[in-house]
Amino acid sequence: MLSPVSAVRRVFGEPLVLFLLAGLGLFLLHRAVAPPRRDLIHITVPFAKALRDDYQKRTGRPPTKEDSDTLIERFIDEEVLYREALVMGLDKGDLIVRRRLVQKMELVGRDSVAEPTQEELLAYYTLHAERYQVAPTVSFKHVFVSSKGNRGDAHTTAQNLFEQIQNGADPSTLGETFANGATFSQRSEIEIENLFGAAFKETAFSQPPEKWSRPVLSHFGYHLIWVIERRPASLAPLSTVQNLVRNEVLGEKRDAAARRQTDTLRARYVIQMDPGVN
Amino acid sequence: MIRRRPSLVRIGPIFALFLLAGCPDIDSSPPQAFQYTEMRAACANRDPLKKAYFGDLHVHTAFSFDAWTYDVRTTPADAYRFARGEPVNLPPLDENGVGKTVVQLDRPLDFAAVTDHAEYLGETSLCSTPGSPAYDTPTCVAYRPPASSFLGFNVGADPPARADFCQDSTLCTDAAAPVWKVIQQAADEAYDKTDACKFTTFVAYEYSLSPLGTNLHRNVIFRNANVIDTPITTYEADEPHKLWAMLSTLCTNAPTGCDVLAIPHNSNLSNGRMFEVEYKGAKTEEEQLKITKLRAQMEPLVEIYQHKGDSECLSGLSTYPGEPDELCSLEKQQFPPFDDCGVSDTGWGGISGLGCTSWRDYVRGALETGLMEGERLGENPYKLGFIGSTDTHNGTPGKTDESTYAGHLGLADQSPKAALSGSALAGTPLLGNPGGLAGVWAEENSRDALFDALRRRETFATTGPRIIPRFFAGWNYPDNLCDRPDLVSKGYELGVPMGGDLPPMSGSEGPSFVVSALRDSGSTDRPGTPLQRAQIVKIWLDESGQPHEKVIDVAGDPNNGATVNLTTCETQGAGFDSLCTVWRDPEFNASVPSLYYARIVENPTCRWTTHLCNRLTPKERADYKCDNLSVPSTIQERAWTSPIWYTPN
């Protein structure tokens, strides 16, 4: 009489039993990892909803019941043909499919890049500081006398207003309206030159602040200029150019990642070039 | 009702006020008019009395089906860089496909919107991207050089039809989706969100409805980055009222923070259909009123001037309701004897120079129609403010100067021969022009400030120069306003600016109007031109409901004798550096509706054709018939302010 333990040992020692067990294991593994049956096209509720949402995005209206049925039927037709085409190997040797897949791989490489860290942004910003320079600016107000076709008269009037201000007149009550405003804030040299001309720009960028200038000629007449503030050229703080820096860092990282991916993949291949190909 | 996402940066305006405290304004400050609907730094440069900002809201790039066939390769990002003052490369292309002609603005713009044709975005991408599923189809092969023909895209088919390779259209709409993303991204990246507020972009596109070649195009401009998932094109909306309805459903009434307006352009080529009064499908007055209100909400502006001509007015129409206005001869596409539609007829084929021309094709006719419809329905569908833009197909926003104009259609109109002789492919370049600019009065240069100004029509158009016009109307302006430094603050305080409605009448006298304009200062290399005169155009209905027009010279001197030397293009004679006047309408009738807008006119200068001919050799001048061109040798550049309306109680 065998003890139960040795009976079990004996049964599991049988090559046939071991074979069957291995087979069962393989079967279970296959069930777990194998693709669903080749002839099944499974339309789920979320998938049908996605089709309908897409339709609404395209047309601006929800699909009718009939539209919705057509969408699903058309998808099934396409899926059947797509799968059969793969079975028949129609994707092989097709230039368009080949290019499309290459493009997708390139995108996979580019999209593998993580959002740049603050350290990366800072490093890039520091290295390329010259790109984030802010030009010097001036803020000023002005009293305006239009030329009215006679610049000599306008100059006399403006000089007269200058003297009135020196004698205590309120500048905000003097002169004429300048259609584009009496105050300009933080304008660069090029902006001032384009708006008022070269002589005006020279004065606005050299006149001592908080002091009325003598009459200055522009394209429009004469101005008395009061510089409120001038700011020298400066480096824009990272916080204000964060988005620009991010886009540039991300662009560079993406280009590098796409190149790296191709290089890594190429390393897996043996390239054989016959003499004379170059 | 426009729903807005609550301000994400409520601290912004407070911060701006804090900054302004260091720069006290001479004039008093009206309350703050807008809120940010997006994440951005508050502008350091804010003026409650508003500044004039210049931009271009009609710009095509290589993403437009026609531009690509002219060998234009400028992308939306390139176009925005150009607007900011950087160079772009135009055709002819070198062996690497890079343009060999370098162009640059001498003055950057303040804002721009790239408005590529939304129709065929997918088709263009599919046919120009090697490896795309349609790249090797016969239609795509024909689309690329040497044929460079977009005939297979079925442009202008009525009803709209897709290119054959689109199959059931999903291929083409799928291909358009990433292009739309690139357009949005370019606008986002070029938009200055720092407190310097140097440059503003808008996400935008052109809705290119052209049934049988009649122009019904609109530029669709979004307030901020919250836009619709895919552009609504003629394939989704084959009539304009469907576009408004869809924009209303998918944008303004959607809980996404989306806001939008559409700007019609080139009504001069619309055969009476851009501003028609048929209200398709609306049988009752109630239904018509509904469409009218939707239209008024969606389309507060019209692009009055661009490279395909002026749409303000046309002399010689049988229905023209006023004295001849010789300044209407500006950049015309129709020449007498043209086919006149009469009062109510319409035609087809305006883009190709076909079909009849209607009084409603011109903005004055549309404004008159608006007053008449306002009387009939109680709601004016054509209360239109004005902008100008270029419609460049080179991706070169704001390149409006006549002296260096080298076409807007890539290879198709770039060479002197093409420009001066015209070609069937691109219409008639000889009748084209460098286009105009959109002027906007806003507190600062940010999307919300500019968009609000567009919506309230506080805008003006120019033929290219940066003329700066103020225009106010009210009942109680002091007569000496021009001699005072507080014209602008009094303008707002005692009346309304351009684009507004006169408040109810007060007193017994007619309204008075304040016009104050500065000449274009020009750039160091290219000085601006002095002003000749300021005019007010008055449009009104008489007691029997018939429209009338009158043009009144209110400042400057129409007979100042200024001329231009056609050989050197040097200008001679006096002009004005600025103009200002307060004008009261002596013929005002309080019982009928009326409107008024200002027109500021420069001294004559050379038209681009004259500049171009002057650069040619004597033999070329003879070959291209420079001495006998069918277009004027000079142009009087100008600005138009949006109108101000009066409606009787």
Image (tube, rainbow, N blue to C red):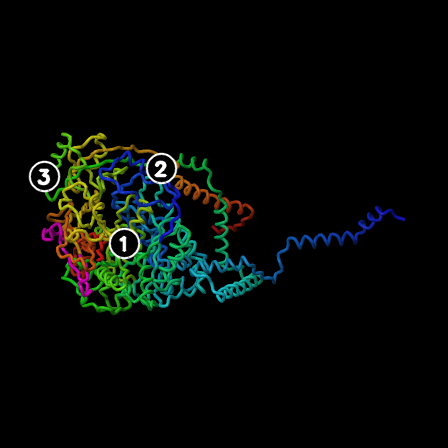
Query: Within the magenta stretch, is there residue A188?
Result: no
Q: Secondary structure at mark 3?
A: helix
How far is disc 3 from disc 1 in space, using C-alphas?
39 Å
Residue A231's x, y, as percent?
29, 33
Q: Nearer the viewer, mark 2 or mark 3?
A: 3
Q: Is residue A156 visible?
A: yes
Query: Within the magenta stretch, is there residue B543?
Result: yes
> Range of the magenta residues?
B538-567
Check residue A152 in the rendering and tell me which mark sits there, or answer none.
Answer: 3
Q: Which residue is mark 2?
A: A132
Check residue A129 in the rendering and tell me which mark sits there, or answer none.
Answer: none
How far is disc 2 from disc 1 in space, using C-alphas?
31 Å
Q: What amino acid is at disc 2? A: Tyr
Question: From the viewer's perspective, is residue A142 above or below residue B339?
Answer: above
Residue B389's x, y, as percent?
27, 53
Return the chain for callout 2.
A
Q: What amino acid is at disc 3? A: Gly
How far is disc 2 from disc 3 in space, using C-alphas?
44 Å
The reply to whether label 2 and label 1 mark residues of one chain is no
Check residue B390 in the rendering and tell me which mark sits there, or answer none.
Answer: 1
